[in-house]
Image (tube, grey):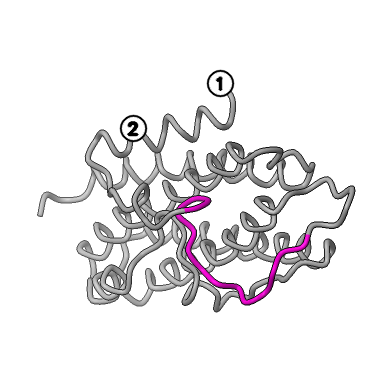
């Protein structure tokens, strides 16, 4: 099964099993991306990458940055050891991935957002202000439950972004973009499975 089909199947299965609809419904464009970077994207003649590739890398920086904000709440909000371990893994893996994406953009003379970009950019699956407040207000097992539910939504949004990337004409073919996008699908598919299992093991509310 191709990466595109895996991403589509997983996002669809989450929707059909009652997962958060926000992963499929935020905005329009690539992966539900809505933002104004304030800089036009110019693709040099003969470049091996496309505008969709640039938008994907820019958008995924903001997407990752919000996941890091969510994950860094875990310790202070009383997450259980398993959820804390997972949140630390997400934090520690996505920080260097942001650097990889920024370096790719800079190498190709494109605007590289910083980690504050999650405040102004909205992609599929990203939390609303209301959802962030819900997460911040939760403690203990309630935090575990909200964090897992919302991070599943968040990861499903990332898979939707990859799916939309590969559906864009000629996008996702440049080697570094292709490898990175496939790595996102591999890692976040596994993490969704882990989170679904952890969520099922929490005490019934």
Report crowding for label 2: few under 14, some 14 to 19, many 20 or more residues within 10 A (C-alpha): few
Q: Residue at x 26, y 72 (%)?
A: 130
Q: Position of residue 33 (x, y in %)?
A: 49, 58
Residue at position x 24%, y 57% from top? 145
Q: What distance separates the C-alpha of mark 2 from that of mark 1? A: 15 Å
User: Mark 2 highlights which residue?
Assistant: 13
Question: For the magenta stretch, what is the residue range?
Answer: 29-42
Image: 51 above or below 65 = above
Residue 132, horizontal then vertical, whole percent: 32, 72
Task: Specify few, some or many for label 1: CA neighbours under 10 Å numbering under 14, 14-19, or 20 or more.
Answer: few
Q: How many marks?
A: 2
Q: Quadrant of the N terminus?
A: top right
Q: Secondary structure at mark 2?
A: helix
Q: Which structural element holds mark 1? A: loop
Q: Quadrant of the C terminus?
A: bottom left
Using the image, tell me which numbered label, if any, was put on residue 189. none
Instruction: Verify whether residue 35 appears in magenta.
Output: yes
**Residue 9 percent across, percent down from the top left:** 42, 29
Vertical side of 87 occupied by 14: above or below? above
Q: Is residue 158 above or below residue 123?
A: above
| Viewer-proximal residue among 12 and 85 | 12
Residue located 26% across and 65% down the image: 143
Residue 128 locus on image (x, y percent): 33, 68
1 vs 87, nearest the viewer: 1
**Mark 2 / mark 1, whichever is N-terminal:** 1
Which is the main secondary structure of the residues drawn in magenta? Answer: loop
Residue found 67% across the figure and 63% down from its top: 96
Residue under circle 1? Answer: 1
State left or right for residue 87 relative to residue 22. Answer: right
Q: Quadrant of residue 12?
A: top left
């Amino acid at each position: 099964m191709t990466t595109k089909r895996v991403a589509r199947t997983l996002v669809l299965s989450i929707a059909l099993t009652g997962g958060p609809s926000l992963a499929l419904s935020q905005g329009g464009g690539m992966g539900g991306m809505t933002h104004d970077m304030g800089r036009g994207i110019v693709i040099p003649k003969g470049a091996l990458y496309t505008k969709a590739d640039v938008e994907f890398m820019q958008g995924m920086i903001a997407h990752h940055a919000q996941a890091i904000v969510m994950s860094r709440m875990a310790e202070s909000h009383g997450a259980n050891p398993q959820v804390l371990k997972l949140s630390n893994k997400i934090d520690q893996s996505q920080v260097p991935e942001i650097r990889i994406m920024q370096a790719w953009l800079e190498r190709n003379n494109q605007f590289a957002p910083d980690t504050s970009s999650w405040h102004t950019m909205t992609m599929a699956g990203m939390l609303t202000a209301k959802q962030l407040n819900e997460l911040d207000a939760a403690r203990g097992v309630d935090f575990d439950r909200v964090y897992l539910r919302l991070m599943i939504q968040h990861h499903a949004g990332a898979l939707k972004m990859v799916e939309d990337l590969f559906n864009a004409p000629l996008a996702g073919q440049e080697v570094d973009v292709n490898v990175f996008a496939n790595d996102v699908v591999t890692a976040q598919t596994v993490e969704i499975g882990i989170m679904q299992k952890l969520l099922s093991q929490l005490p019934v509310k």
